[in-house]
Image (cartoon, rainbow, N blue to C red):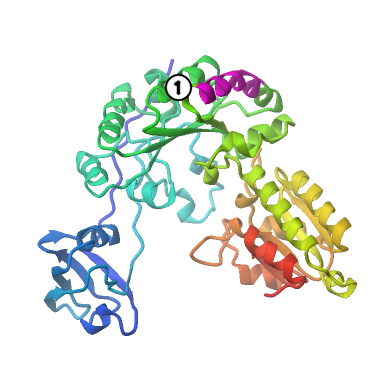
Amino acid sequence: MYEFAVAPAVTTLRRRGVEITEVAPASLAAELELEAGDRIIRVNGRPVRDYLDFRFQTGGETELVIEVRKRSGEDWELEIERDEGEDFGLGFEQIVPRQCANECLFCFCKGNPEDARPSLFVRDEDIRLSFLYGNYTTLTSITADEMRRIIEQRLTPQYVSVHATDLKVRAHLLGVDEKRADISGKMQQLLDAGIEIHAQVVLCPEINDGEILRRTIEDLAALHPQVKSVAIVPLGLTRYNTDERLTAVTPEFCRRTIAELEPLQQELRERLGTTFAFLGDEIYVKAGRTVPTRKHYGDYPQIEDGIGMVRAFQHDFSSLMRRLERRAFSPTETARLEGTVMTGTLFAPTLKRLIARANEKFGTRLHVVAVENQYFGGDVSVAGLLTGGDFLKARDEVRGSFVVIPGSAIKSDEDIMLDGMTLRELREEMSVPVLPLDFDAFARLLEKAEFQI
């Protein structure tokens, strides 16, 4: 028997308008004497809720009336004439996420340690973040006003967690009733308005796999090309997940899923011209299978969801190797590159093979360390969820004069990791310099044959 709970939508009390955080020197905003701390309340009589509203309401307009609440409390009304396309030179406060009202069985927030940072328990369900960053929404509690905003402001594409088109299964997974679980009308409204959708399925063994998964893919494929793709990613369980309704993803399950979907993927390529339904890299790696070719992924429509990351990295690394081969390194240069590259246990075998090629060809001495995620435990093995404490527990394996850690393990807007440790604190604890790098920065390190803090 499926059980569900109905939770009210979570809202955040906030002040009117959007706060200015930065004014570029010699910009239009500076000429208007706008300052950090001022709030823009309305543009041409329309309320401004966030910087997306400001961008939409000022875009293409050359004559504007802007209402401002100064940080002093004074109200200004500015009548502005500007050149077409002229930038204001303003920076704004970050969007406060609208929070989710579901009680999803598999929600990763339920797998956090009790003492985790409060921000790790924030479950966003925000159409703005979906448009800006590819965050997924379920659409279950999206309001009519938010639907209108997507369409009016052309917030496309939207990323939607579908999980299952079978309403009973979807309701069970999301912890809502079947009426709320049914988003077919909302999806059709968006598609009819020309909004593109990328869908997601979090694959939970014995719940939405097998025939349920096949039906979900077929139902979404019937909406192609407006529904552009489906990402099928495996359930991730930490040691703190205690829900007995969830079954861990095993290598055998991954192999079975690949075998079941490969014929369907081939059929979709023939029918739609795209693989359309993509399995997450973790499924191939856990199954002990080689990830598909670049052709399989097309333009990598959902790479940020772990769809094709391994293949893209391998391709980029091969390109890097060719660039390095065209450069003549001296033994002195390559000898300086002796260090350690830390990554998650999932990607470590692939990275070790690639780094071994570089070491053999160019004389570098790079050592790959597979870092176990002890903070979350369970089957969490991706690099982006490693913490400062995890890196420190592996420091006895450090070799050479520097350590590279995944840039994805660092919060984007501040130098802090998931366990609250700052990059500065990690560097102080390590015996050598620590470099958080994405692939491009790592490539520059190899091309320059030197490291910089």
The residue that label 1 is drawn on is 216
Residue at 38% over, 40% down: 137
Q: Is residue 324 left or right of residue 64?
A: right
Q: Is residue 268 magenta?
A: yes
The location of residue 188, given as percent across then percent down, is: 28, 29
274 or 370, which lies in front? 274
Q: Is residue 203 magenta?
A: no
Query: Where is the N terminus found, in terms of image quarters?
Result: top left
Q: Quadrant of residue 84?
A: bottom left
State whether residue 306 appears in this view. Answer: yes
Q: Quadrant of residue 40?
A: bottom left
Please state the extent of the stretch shown in magenta in the rendering. 256-270
Q: Is residue 146 left or right of residue 351?
A: left
39 or 450, which lies in front? 450
301 or 136, which lies in front? 301
Query: Where is the C terminus found, in terms of image quarters?
Result: bottom right
Magenta-drawn stretch, dominant element (helix, strand or loop): helix
How many labels, in total? 1
Residue at 53% over, 42% down: 299
